[in-house]
Image (cartoon, helix red, strand yellow):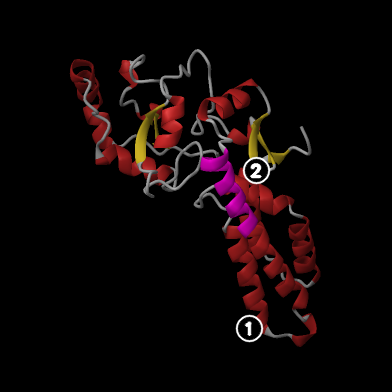
Amino acid sequence: MIKLSRPDCPEELEKLKDELTQEYKDTKKTVWKRKFITVPLLKMSNDKCAFCECKLGEEGKYMQVEHFHHKNEYKDEVVDWNNLLPICIRCNSHKLDHDTYLLPIIDPTQIDPKNHLEFYKYRMLGKDDIGNLTVEVLDLNNTTEIATPRFQIGNAVLEKLEDVLEVVQNFDVDSKDATEKARVIRKVRALLKKSTSVNIYCATVATVLLTAPDYLLLKLEMEKKALWTVELQKIEDSVANIALDQRERF
């Protein structure tokens, strides 16, 4: 889970909010399934579930509109823009009618998850009560559905890191080969970008990459050979902003 920046309320929703709210109260219709709502929600999360970060639109992972404060209990917020999130059916089925006013969990558009969650062996752990409750309510450590995909994508990045480190170590500074230098930098850039916010499970990937011993060696070697650029540092900074603290042990 990562911090999401909510865009301004869609103009059409602003105009129709009262009408749609009343329609829901009268009929219980799913008045939130409108493109002017769903499209900007998906864009906000880079087509991912706001909670588990799986890719929405894949088989069995179609998007649902989440009412952070449950629509049955808080009907006036049924199309309140600040109450809506893109969610997968798995997370939605776990959250159900949990009362987020009485028992708060993380709303990633309001709270930075990294302040309340940390990482241990591909598991999300709470740093405090709100983090612990978020993990439990959303079942964020379900082995089959979440933890295993996290491990698979994290392990793939570590394997890629090994390959890129070898390329960097083999680069001969004295050769002054500009083409090879550009190729090395490009490979490191591509590796870092696998951890940026547009990618699935990016909180996991960012954490795994930045804490890997091989990554520390990679950066040291890049700096030693004058290959580390301002652009690479900017990408790393953005990755560090979404990486979670890693717990050494329980």
- Mark number, residue 122: 2
Q: Position of residue 175 (x, y in %)?
A: 76, 87
Which residue is found at the position 52% from the left and 25% from the top? Answer: 137
Which residue is found at the position 55% from the left and 30% from the top? Answer: 111
Q: Secondary structure at mark 1?
A: helix
Disc 2 residue type (three-letter):
Tyr
- Mark number, residue 179: 1
Which residue is found at the position 54% from the left and 28% from the top? Answer: 106
- 118 is within the stretch colored magenta: no
- Where 120 falls versus 188 (above or below)? above
Q: CA distance from mark 1 to mark 2?
A: 38 Å
- For the C terminus, the image quarter is top right
Q: Is residue 144 left or right of residue 167?
A: left
Magenta range = 143-156
- Give 149 or 16, whichever is nearer the viewer: 149
Q: Is residue 4 left or right of residue 28?
A: right
Disc 1 residue type (three-letter):
Thr
Q: Is residue 230 visible in this depiction of the protein?
A: no
Quadrant in the picture for residue 19: top left
- Mark number, residue 37: none
Instruction: Check disc 2: other Cα within 10 Å, few if <14, some if 14-19, many if 20+.
Output: many
Q: Position of residue 117 (x, y in %)?
A: 64, 33
Q: Which residue occupies the extreme front position in the image?
A: 144
Magenta-highlighted stretch: main secondary structure?
A: helix
Q: Secondary structure at mark 2?
A: loop
Judge depth for marks 1 and 2 and give the one in front.
Answer: 2
Q: Position of residue 237 (x, y in %)?
A: 65, 51
Q: Is residue 214 left or right of residue 2?
A: right
Quadrant in the picture for residue 158: bottom right
